[in-house]
Image (tube, grey):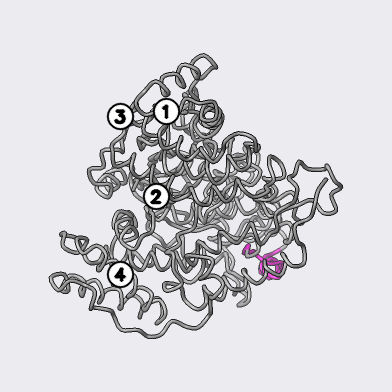
Amino acid sequence: MSALAHSREKFPKKPQATPRSNLPNVSKRTRDEEDEKRSPAKRRSGQGKATRRPPARPEEPSLIADVATALADEHPLTLISLVSALLAALAPRRTNPFERALEPDPPTRDELVRTFLEVNLLETSALLAVIAELSGDDIMRHRIRREITKRVHALPGWLTELGQATADGAVEMNHVLGDGNNIMIGMSLPGGSALSLVFYIDHNMGTVIKDAFTVPEPLEALVERMRLANGDDPDTTWADLALADARARVRQAITLSDTALLPLETDTWPACRPFVEWVLSKLPAGGTSYQRPAWNEPTLAELAKRFFASPFGIGLGDADHRGVLESLLWFGTAYGPGDPLRWSPAAVEILLLHWIPRKVPPGIALAKAPNLLRAFIRFCHHEREIRAELTAATLAAVDKYEPEYLRAIQLPRPQDVAALLAMMNTFPPNAPNGTWPAPKTEPSIWEIMRDNLCRAVGSEDALNTLDALPLPDEPFAWDPIPADIHERVREVLQLVDRCCDELLDVECRTACRRYLSRAAAADPEIFRRRSRPETAAAAICWGIGKANDLFSGKIRVKDLMSHFGIGQGSVSARSGTLLRAIGVDPLDQYRELNLGSPDYLTSARREELLARRDHYRAMADRFPPTPTR
């Protein structure tokens, strides 16, 4: 499995985003209470003793308490990340243009700053000091600094000198298949603290920021830990990156992300964007951004000629296959990173499940695309000297997605704009015939969503017979496990059970036991190799947590890893091995983690899937496919 950060669980992170609907605030009552404690002169000047902290309303999130906790943390990143998330939550939000806003607009940044200026507390002074730096607004910065100098609070030295932070260097981590790359930037803060920023830039999706977050450790230590977690992967390379180039490439990815119809969001991006923008402003300009390869018609014609003349293209030179290859070359040069010789499992999935059904009209021999793609992948990997194991994984992706692809091209399907709207589950209401390019019928929402639900439970039959009964308190299944690994498996089992008892619940424990038992039975070699039982136990619990969407609210990944006393990066390689043992492809990077069976799903997760199934079925009955012109 690639060591690239397709999953941000590979790194330990600090604070998460501040949801707009839960924006903490300093209430008007709080401001009035503070005014009552000041003389009229002091209210005008802001001078005098710091006021007593007012009690927080029990029903409201307490920003003041959060800031106090962050100030007590030994690392400045806790407070910086909190303020960054707050500023990001106040930024104008881009939403689906076809949906009505469900939440009222939050207060503006200026309104919030005025509130903090009116409340003379140590915590509001700390907030203002960070906002002054991250805002990028010189007028606001000077105004805040004037106010803070009038107050009597003793702020940490790093906070008053935050503007003197310096960049230590940048490192780029690349994988030979080129789906994306990590850029890591190290920073030193006044007072001796260091931190790193990590960006995963996805080239398949258009060289955009797929995730970004901060790590409270120096760049050198982060890279060393990443190298250790990555092992001796021959397909991953590390290289120092000029700070100007790091700035240019991250800036390019942010700009392209902003042009996307629906930009990607995670629990840390764009929450850390204000801090990222501030860091980029401290890096030198003039760097080199990502450059797309230049391909013209003569060079593509030469490439096609070379392929059909090679041993890989023998017998494929007829008109049908040549027409299909033209589509593959169109995809390779116009989409993703723009390299028709680059093929990975992710690129195969995008091509077969999304791009061809959406972009290529009926009329060419689309059913021949999978076989031609297999031959072309072998040819390209041979030219690029890609390892046989990676070629096998890419070809396996063709096998995996071929049945779904063949079904897709045989059914009426929308294309271009209509296809994009279908992917968004959005159709123009009461649109007259001809408003959108469309096939003979628009697919129902049920048809669009069914495959996602089937993947979550393993098959359509499993979806049809799904129930929401709680998983039983089930004993561990030892029978199918070879006796020589019982001791190693028992060590892992004890750690898994303890984690479920302390952090999760009985249903999760049963699911984890099933996962561990089936993985050990399917691939005993996993437990014959020397490794820490804590890593395997964490990987088991992480997999069940992801499959049941527990990390969206029930527990944080970093809390799970802390329970086992390990870093998040230690789990990724072991997770890939365990997933392969139960028949799940860890290279499937474009979907939520699905373990392929309801046996691993808690009653709450299955109840959620049932509700979605019944909801979309009802919508399908109410809004059947509609004929078009």
Amino acid type, mark 4: Arg
Tell me the CA gap for discs 4 and 1: 43 Å
| Between discs 2 and 4, the one toward the N terminus | 4
User: Within the image, what quadrant is residue 181 found in?
Assistant: top left
Q: Which residue is mark 2?
A: 587
| Between discs 4 and 3, the one toward the N terminus | 3
Pointers 2 and 1 in contact (C-beta within 8 Å): no
Amino acid type, mark 3: Glu
Q: Which residue is mark 3?
A: 385
Question: Percent x, y for residue 623?
Answer: 77, 62
Q: Which residue is mark 4?
A: 518
| Between discs 2 and 1, the one toward the N terminus | 1
Tell me the CA gap for discs 2 and 1: 31 Å
Q: Dot 4, crowdedness within 10 Å: few (<14), some or many (≥20)?
A: some
Residue that appears at 43% across and 81% down: 471
The one of 202 and 342 positioned closer to us in this rendering: 342
| Between discs 4 and 1, the one toward the N terminus | 1
The one of 281 and 466 positioned closer to us in this rendering: 466
**Would residue 166 be visible to someone looking at this image?**
no
The C terminus - image quarter = top right
Q: Secondary structure at mark 1?
A: loop
Question: Percent x, y for residue 3?
Answer: 34, 46
Image position of 243 (left or right of 147): left
Q: Report the span colored magenta.
A: 23-39
Tell me the CA gap for discs 4 and 3: 36 Å
